């Protein structure tokens, strides 16, 4: 290895240590920290983000990048070292545009805004959260202005989560999707009596839910010797290395789905991180390519595998044995219907596969409008409720069940939501390709074996980490750009059958 490349790697690894220390403080904040710790935690995280930012944007990093680029100029595009230099140069150019003071303030504000949101949500008090949201939007605008954009300010923020995609393309994809989804939702509504979800709305012991969720996570392929599962209000996955990838889930004593499918969802994220090549582990390439590619994996394991008939054909008897009182008399068809019931609802994270994307479109449109200052933050709850009524036919009775439900705006994550729907689309594009190339995966899944699918995903997606831009990765894996054909066909077929359309 070249001397300059080696020095660059050392420097980037130190920066990564600071970032991972922040990630651990955030994990602790979400899982263990008492509410009183928020103010101190905000300062600790602000310091770490300042130190990491200063080290990264220093001229020394730029010098090392330029020299390492010389040393790696003859290597192939997909070589680990060539990719490290290429991707780090892009990160450097972008990060350098952000003043350290803004980075620090954004971090501090996000931690405090999060605590304000927790209280506002508990008290159904949007007015208490409103000034925090105004500040988040203002800081997001400043971030976008520093980062720069061509068409739309939103693109600068979107690019932080989904490098390379523009909001105009997202709008086109969503418009196409909406045209097919709205009639599908309407057709299902006419036949809503065919399926109901009563089976999953019963009392389920939380410890038994946890034990079964862990078993299913291990069956999907989550390696618990390199991971752990904890309870939180807002489920998430975080990793400190491919050998320490943690997930959380939430338990509801009268509703089985949140913990069961939430665990599968985070397991999908975690298996991606655990599957990154160990050679990339200590570098900036040692994590998933983007939010949408990540979400394609959580949604694939949660929905395409985890809510499929073959999967439960194999594992439903096990679940019945854990909850005999609740499920012994429920046959598999009824259970399959219960976990796939389509019903317009208020809460995104509980939404079924068909209506889910409409929740995302609402947030995407509102983020664009709020950022562009098309209406004041004080008007946002009413806009939210009107959109819910027009897209889903339901009107939130409170802001807790409306605009205050999601964690993202409290954490400053403007630009993130569209990646959920893009991930849904991509999940089927990848799954379809895996089955085309390895038809035996279908039979394996019917026997409850997930290894074949996981191996294909590891080979095509996981092991590469952040080496490739999302568009490059999708093209290399499937031979075409992101497309929603396979996704819409999947929804039409699955729910057409279930509802007899
Ligand atoms: Zn996710």
Image (cartoon, helix red, strand yellow):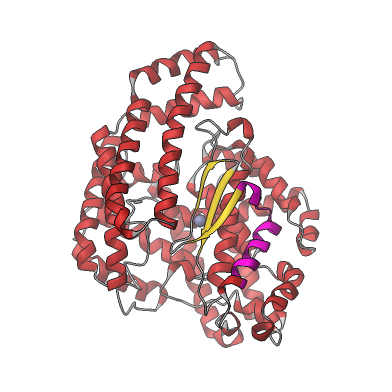
Front-lying residue, 459 or 122: 122
Query: Can residue 102 be seen here?
Result: yes
Q: Position of residue 192 (x, y in %)?
A: 55, 84
Q: Residue 69, relative to residue 396: is it above or below?
A: above
The answer to which of 3 and 99 lies nearer the viewer is: 3
Q: Say which residue appears at 59% left-offset and 41% top-offset.
A: 242
Q: Is residue 267 left or right of residue 443?
A: left
Indicate whether 43 appears above or below 305: above
Tell me residue 207's x, y (percent).
59, 71
- Residue displayed at 19% across by 65% down: 378
Quadrant location of the N terminus in the rendered image: top right
Q: Main secondary structure of the magenta part?
A: helix
Residue 34: which quarter of the image?
A: bottom left
Q: Is residue 319 above or below residue 84?
A: below
Residue 451 locus on image (x, y percent): 74, 52
Residue 7 magenta: no
Count of numbered labels shown in the rendering: 0
Looking at the image, can residue 461 be seen?
no
Left or right position of 43 against 285:
left
Residue at 65 percent of width and 64 percent of height: 306
Percent coordinates x, y for residue 390 in the rendering:
36, 74
- In magenta, the rendered stretch is 208-226
In the rendered view of the protein, which quadrant contains the C terminus?
A: bottom right
């Amino acid at each position: 290895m070249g001397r300059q490349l080696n020095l660059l790697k050392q420097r980037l690894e130190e920066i990564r240590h600071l970032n991972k220390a922040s990630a651990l403080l955030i994990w602790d904040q979400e899982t263990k920290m008492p509410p009183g710790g928020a103010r101190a935690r905000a300062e600790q995280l602000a310091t770490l983000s300042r130190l990491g930012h200063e080290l990264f944007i220093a001229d020394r990093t730029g010098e090392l990048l330029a020299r390492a680029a010389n040393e790696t100029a003859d290597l192939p595009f997909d070589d680990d070292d060539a990719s490290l230099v290429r991707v780090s140069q892009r990160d450097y150019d972008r990060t350098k545009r952000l003043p350290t003071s803004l980075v620090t303030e954004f971090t501090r504000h996000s931690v405090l805004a999060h605590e304000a949101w927790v209280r506002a949500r508990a008290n159904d008090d949007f007015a208490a959260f409103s000034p925090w949201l105004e500040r988040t939007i203002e800081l997001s605008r400043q971030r976008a202005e520093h980062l720069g954009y061509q068409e739309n300010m939103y693109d600068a923020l979107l690019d932080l989560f989904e490098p390379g995609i523009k909001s105009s393309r997202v709008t086109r994809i969503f418009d196409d999707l909406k045209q097919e989804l709205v009639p599908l939702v309407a057709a299902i509504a006419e036949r809503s009596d065919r399926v109901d979800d009563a089976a999953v709305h019963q009392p389920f012991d939380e410890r038994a839910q946890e034990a079964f969720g862990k078993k299913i996570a291990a069956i999907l392929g989550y390696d618990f010797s390199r991971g752990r599962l904890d309870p939180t209000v807002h489920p998430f996955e975080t990793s400190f290395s491919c050998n320490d990838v943690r997930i959380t889930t939430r338990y509801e004593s009268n509703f089985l789905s949140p913990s069961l499918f939430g665990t599968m969802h985070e397991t999908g994220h975690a298996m991606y991180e655990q599957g990154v090549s160990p050679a990339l582990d200590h570098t900036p390439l040692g994590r998933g390519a983007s939010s949408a590619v990540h979400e394609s994996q959580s949604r694939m394991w949660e929905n395409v595998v985890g809510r499929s008939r073959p999967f439960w054909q194999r594992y439903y008897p096990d679940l019945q044995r854990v909850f005999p009182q609740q499920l012994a008399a429920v046959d598999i068809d009824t259970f399959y219907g219960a976990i796939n019931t389509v019903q317009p609802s208020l809460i995104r994270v509980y939404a079924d596969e068909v209506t889910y994307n409409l929740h995302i479109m609402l947030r995407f449109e509102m983020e664009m409008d709020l950022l562009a200052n098309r209406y004041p933050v004080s008007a946002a709850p009413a806009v939210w409720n009107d959109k819910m009524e027009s897209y889903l036919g339901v009107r939130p009775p409170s802001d807790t069940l409306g605009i205050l439900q999601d964690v993202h705006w409290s954490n400053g994550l403007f630009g993130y939501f569209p990646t959920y729907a893009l991930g849904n689309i991509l999940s089927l594009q990848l799954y379809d390709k895996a089955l085309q190339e390895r038809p035996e995966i279908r039979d394996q899944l019917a026997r409850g074996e997930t290894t074949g699918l996981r191996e294909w995903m590891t080979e095509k997606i996981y092991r590469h980490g952040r080496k490739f831009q999302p568009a490059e990765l999708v093209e290399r894996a499937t031979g075409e750009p992101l497309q929603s054909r396979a996704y819409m066909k999947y929804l039409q077929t699955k729910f057409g059958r279930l509802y007899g359309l």
